[in-house]
Image (spheres, grey):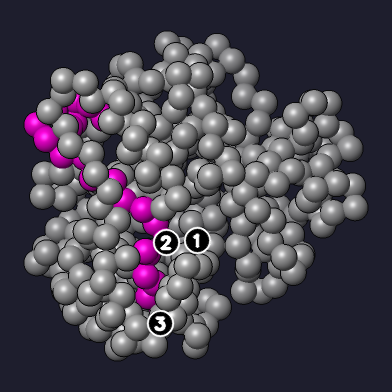
């Protein structure tokens, strides 16, 4: 973590250790939540060939990332298995890939393997830029006092006075603010006059409820992009051309039948499952099991909300449980978006 930012957070009563940043007095679900996002890693890709380089690596169309638009994207193996999921934005002409912090070092090493003669620099920017989140119905009004026109829809972005502002998806208005430590500290102080500090678990919970997947260390290479609904949240371009794993991803869309899909679920348990944990179904005919946990976080109302990749047939049959037949039963609230997409001919 950036030292200047660490000192600022500690001055605001934050406790910081290897487990992350925690505010001891933070509410479980503040109506107006202000969150440090240092638990997320950041990769900076710069140089005159940066756009073309990433165009051949990621699932989405990098040409659509502008100062006014960010996107979700995936990074696959040649077999189409996800190594990472990214939030991609542009700032000062450079491209930034936000992802699970624990994956950053390995991803940088892998990306650098393919640079070859391209004029591209890839580096860890996790400490270079500070990122905070603002969530709640309060957010648009609070931000309107600092930005001439905050983005009104998911995918929108704007940079003003040293701060890049991204409007994120989900039922609850959510924004990410990005800048240097000194500038973001000033913004935090301004927003904290009405917003309450919230811990990282709450931000991750909002991501889960928005149906946004995150590849964790335990689930690297566990899913193809369609299994975690990347095509439903504009995380895949089927018209951009070739990229690593593209043949497998395209074949699944045009020629295959998707047998597993990601769902939002809830379980009544005191201990949330870990990414990669198994889901049991008595109806599963697969030797691979009924499914796996993508991510899970405590719900303020009790129990845990989670994203799970399941056999579609097992989901339709019901009686899905954590771990084994005696595990907590999964319940399925209304999904954050429709789970079907019309198949298109190539």
Point out residue 248 in the picture as x, y percentages from the top left corner. 49, 17
Q: Earlier in the sequence, mark 2 or mark 3?
A: 3
Crowd rating for badge 3 (residues with CA inside 10 Å; few <14, some 14–19, many 20+): many
Q: Is residue 192 visible?
A: yes
- Indicate whether 326 appears above or below 199: above
Q: Position of residue 209 (x, y in %)?
A: 54, 57
The answer to whether 177 is drawn above or below residue 84 in the figure is: below
Q: Nearer the viewer, mark 1 or mark 3?
A: 3
Mark 2 and 1 residues: CB-CB less than 8 Å, in contact? yes
- Residue under the point 9% across and 67% down: 161
Question: Magenta includes 38?
Answer: yes
Q: Which residue is mark 2?
A: 39
Name the secondary structure under disc 3: loop
Q: Nearer the viewer, residue 50 or 171?
A: 50
Crowdedness near tag 1: few (<14), some (14–19) or many (≥20) residues, C-alpha within 10 Å: some
Q: Is residue 322 above or below residue 119?
A: below
Q: Which mark is residue 32?
A: none
Looking at the rendered image, the disc whose residue lies closer to the viewer, 2 or 1, is 2
Q: Is residue 290 magenta?
A: no
In this image, 155 relative to 170: left or right?
Answer: left
- Distance CA(mark 2)–CA(mark 1): 10 Å
Q: Horizontally, is 318 left or right of 74 in the view?
A: right
Q: Which residue is mark 3?
A: 14
Residue at image x 16%, y 74%?
182
Q: Which mark is on residue 204?
A: 1
For residue 75, what is the image quadrant? top left
Disc 2, SS: loop
Sequence-earlier tag: 2 or 1: 2
């Amino acid at each position: 973590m950036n030292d200047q930012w660490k000192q600022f957070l500690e001055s605001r009563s934050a406790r910081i250790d290897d487990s992350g940043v925690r505010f001891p007095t933070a509410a479980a679900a503040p109506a107006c939540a202000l969150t440090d996002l240092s638990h997320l890693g950041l990769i900076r890709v710069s140089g005159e060939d940066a756009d073309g380089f990433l165009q051949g690596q990621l699932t989405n169309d990098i040409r659509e990332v502008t100062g006014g638009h960010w996107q979700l994207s995936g990074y696959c193996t040649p077999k189409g298995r996800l190594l990472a999921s990214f939030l991609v934005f542009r700032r000062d002409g450079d491209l930034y890939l936000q992802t699970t912090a624990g994956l950053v070092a390995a991803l940088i090493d892998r990306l650098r393997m393919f640079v070859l003669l391209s004029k591209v620099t890839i580096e860890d920017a996790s400490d270079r830029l500070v990122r905070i989140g603002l969530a709640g119905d309060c957010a648009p009004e609070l931000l309107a006092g600092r930005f001439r026109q905050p983005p009104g829809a998911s995918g929108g972005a704007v940079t003003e006075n040293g701060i890049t502002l991204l409007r994120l998806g989900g039922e609850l208005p959510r924004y990410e603010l990005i800048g240097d430590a000194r500038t973001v500290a000033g913004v935090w102080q301004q927003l904290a006059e009405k917003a309450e500090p919230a811990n990282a678990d709450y931000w991750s919970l909002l991501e889960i409820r928005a149906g946004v997947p995150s590849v964790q260390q335990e689930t690297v290479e566990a899913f193809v992009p369609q299994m975690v609904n990347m095509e439903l949240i504009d995380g895949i371009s089927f018209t951009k051309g070739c990229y690593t794993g593209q043949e497998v991803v395209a074949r699944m869309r045009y020629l295959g039948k998707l047998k597993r899909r990601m769902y939002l679920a809830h379980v009544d348990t005191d201990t949330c499952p870990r990414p990669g944990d198994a889901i049991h179904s008595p109806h599963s005919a697969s030797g691979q099991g009924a499914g796996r946990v993508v991510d899970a976080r405590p719900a303020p109302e009790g129990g845990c909300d989670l994203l799970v990749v399941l056999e579609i047939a097992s989901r339709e049959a019901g009686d899905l449980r954590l771990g084994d037949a005696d595990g907590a039963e999964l319940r399925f609230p209304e999904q954050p978006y429709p789970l079907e997409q019309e198949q298109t001919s190539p």
